[in-house]
Amino acid sequence: MSKRTVLTGITTTGTPHLGNYVGAIKPAIAASRDENVRSFYFLADYHALIKCQEPDLVARSTLEIAATWLALGLDTDTAVFYRQSDIPEITELTWLITCSTAKGLMNRAHAYKAAVQDNLDAGEDPDYAITMGLFSYPILMAADILMFNADHVPVGRDQVQHLEMARDIAQRFNHHYGELFTLPEAVVDEHVAVLPGQDGRKMSKSYGNTIPLWLPQKQLRKAIMKIVTNSLEPGEPKDPEGSALFAIYAAFATPAEREEMRAAFAAGIAWGEAKQRTFEKIDGELAEARERYEALMAQPGEIEETLRAGARRAREEAAPFMERLREAVGIRRLG
Ligand code: TRP
């Protein structure tokens, strides 16, 4: 039986936060240990340029995200870990599939449509501040996926449409040029918790409610102390349902610990005490990795080497496949 190929990309904008850790990074690293899969994880730095035109932020985020995955134990001997921009075949493939992708398909992308709608609502020109990068975003993402013939692509719900587009793009290309691409499937993990942020809404950079993953211990404690609760006094029973603090604790706890905390809520634990326990829980899980993270951040050259080694492995597949694709579309040696 041949191994399934699992691939996912992480856009290099921003600093990893607890929501990214619980919702994406931790499950992905665990999944990469499965011996029946070939995993490809990459830093989507070309995608970052679509959202962020601040060079230092893109560079910084790339370093932080790479260090994060390595510190948390991604095994780069099994998983292929690389930077999108180190694989020139991906941009080459982007063009090949751009030439057979219907513009109408891109017109339907939720992210693009939302940007147009925002412009219309603001009384602007519909194209205002919309770049071709934003418009073509799903094509670059399709190239990321099709380049390695991924079977499964773990993503958040917001990315499911992009996977459907990647399938459409692959089908159309296959129809025209022969069965070259595997049709990828999105994998949305229903069990992974959506972590609330300090204000109780989903933890997200756009809400400004995130707790960065690698805060030093003291600051981590402070950030947890700021999670919203209500005015119930110590001794008054508290409801775990709808409590951001409980949800955050639960994301780091074993099932038995979760039940204990549930009982403590019912018994009227003080908010301060529940926060302290939450801090200890999270800090206990992250403390060792935090040391590795800090050590890695002090040695960016080592991270660079690791990424380059990953890129070499990725290109061992991408380069010969790209030759077949070029041949298939008629870009051939003469004679
Ligand atoms: N667009 C994805 C996101 O914002 C990141 C990404 C880029 C990606 N290329 C990918 C994810 C390929 C999966 C496969 O989350």
Image (tube, rainbow, N blue to C red):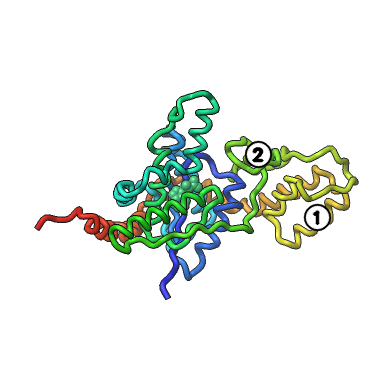
Q: Is residue 62 left or right of residue 241?
A: left
Position of residue 195 measured from the top left corner of the image (x, y, whole percent): 65, 48
Q: Nearer the viewer, residue 17 or 164?
A: 164
At 29% from the left edge and 60% from the top edge, which residue is drawn?
321
Q: Is residue 324 left or right of residue 274?
A: left
For the residue labelled by badge 1, is the local secondary structure a helix, a strand or a loop? Answer: helix
At 35% from the left edge and 60% from the top edge, which residue is drawn?
181
Position of residue 114 measured from the top left corner of the image (x, y, whole percent): 52, 37
Position of 317 relative to 36 (above/below): above
Disc 1 from disc 2: Cα separation = 26 Å
Which residue position holds label 2? Answer: 219
Which residue position holds label 1? Answer: 262
Residue at the farthest front position: 104
Number of on-image labels: 2
User: Does any portion of residue 66 appear in the rendered image?
Assistant: no
Q: Quadrant of residue 127?
A: top left
